[in-house]
């Protein structure tokens, strides 16, 4: 399975979907490993849902039906930020998931696993040193 570590996303273009998660500050402080359940559909980053070539005019990327194929497991960064996850779904779309991590009450789609990291179910490449650190809530996503 994949290992986790920082990477710098130097690519531009390609398909990118957006997802959000909110976690308690304590989880960030502990750099907890979490499991994140991605939704069935991710909004297209390029067109914000309007429809473009990257997403086949649909405005979204459809992820695998099986919930377990949509799970990501990763260690949290030290602070709220935007993470860019490369190739989150093997041989699937999108090629990138832009995951906004913000601080607050844990959302339903996230579960703390740490301290013991376990192998990721999805092939998750390195994520984001390129993370744009934003102290509070994040808004790549303009909804
Ligand atoms: Zn699009």
Image: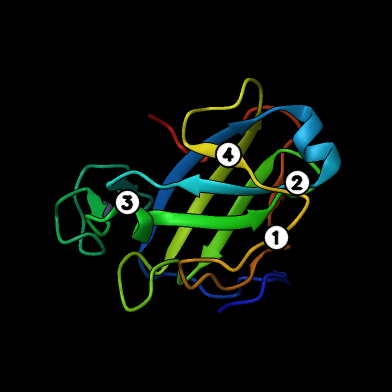
- Where disc 1 sits, the SS reads loop
Residue, x 22% and y 48% (percent of image)? 59
Label 3 residue near ligand 1, CB within 8 Å: no
Disc on the earlier residue, 1 or 3: 3
Q: Work out how far the residue at label 4 is from the one at label 1, CA to CA, in angstroms.
A: 12 Å
Label 2 residue near ligand 1, CB within 8 Å: no
Question: Which residue has dot 3 on it?
Answer: 67
Mark 4 residue crowding within 10 angstroms, few (<14) / some (14–19) / many (20+): some
Cβ–Cβ under 8 Å for marks 4 and 1: no
Q: Work out how far the residue at label 1 is from the one at label 3, CA to CA, in angstroms.
A: 20 Å
- In the image, residue 8 sits, relative to residue 141, either above or below, namely below
Image coords of residue 16 (percent x, y): 40, 59
In the picture, measured across the screen, residue 140 lies left or right of residue 44, that is: right
Q: Work out how far the residue at label 3 is from the one at label 2, CA to CA, in angstroms.
A: 22 Å
Mark 3 residue crowding within 10 angstroms, few (<14) / some (14–19) / many (20+): few
Question: Which residue has dot 2 on it?
Answer: 32
Disc on the earlier residue, 2 or 4: 2
Image coords of residue 138 (percent x, y): 60, 33
For ligand 1, give the image quadrant. bottom left
Q: Residue furthest right?
A: 29
Image coords of residue 7 (percent x, y): 69, 72
Q: Work out how far the residue at label 2 is from the one at label 4, CA to CA, in angstroms.
A: 10 Å
Question: Which residue has dot 4 on it?
Answer: 111
Report the quarter where the N terminus lies: bottom right
Cβ–Cβ under 8 Å for marks 2 and 1: no
Disc on the earlier residue, 3 or 2: 2
Question: Which residue has dot 1 on it?
Answer: 117
Report the quarter where the C terminus lies: top left
Depth check: 92 or 16 in front?
A: 92
Residue, x 14% and y 55% (percent of image)? 57
Cβ–Cβ under 8 Å for marks 3 and 2: no
């Amino acid at each position: 399975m994949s290992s986790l570590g920082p990477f710098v996303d130097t690519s531009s273009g390609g398909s990118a979907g957006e997802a959000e998660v909110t976690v308690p500050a304590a989880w960030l402080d502990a750099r907890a490993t979490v499991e994140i359940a991605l939704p069935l559909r991710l909004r297209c980053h390029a067109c914000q849902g309007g429809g473009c070539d990257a997403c086949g005019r649909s405005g979204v990327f459809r992820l695998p039906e099986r919930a377990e194929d949509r799970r990501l497991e990763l260690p949290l960064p030290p602070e709220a930020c935007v993470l860019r996850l490369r190739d989150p779904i093997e041989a699937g779309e999108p090629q990138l998931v832009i995951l906004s991590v913000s601080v607050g009450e844990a959302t339903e789609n996230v579960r703390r696993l740490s301290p013991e990291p376990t192998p990721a179910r999805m092939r998750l490449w390195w994520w984001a040193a390129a993370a744009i650190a934003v102290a509070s809530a994040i808004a790549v996503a303009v909804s």
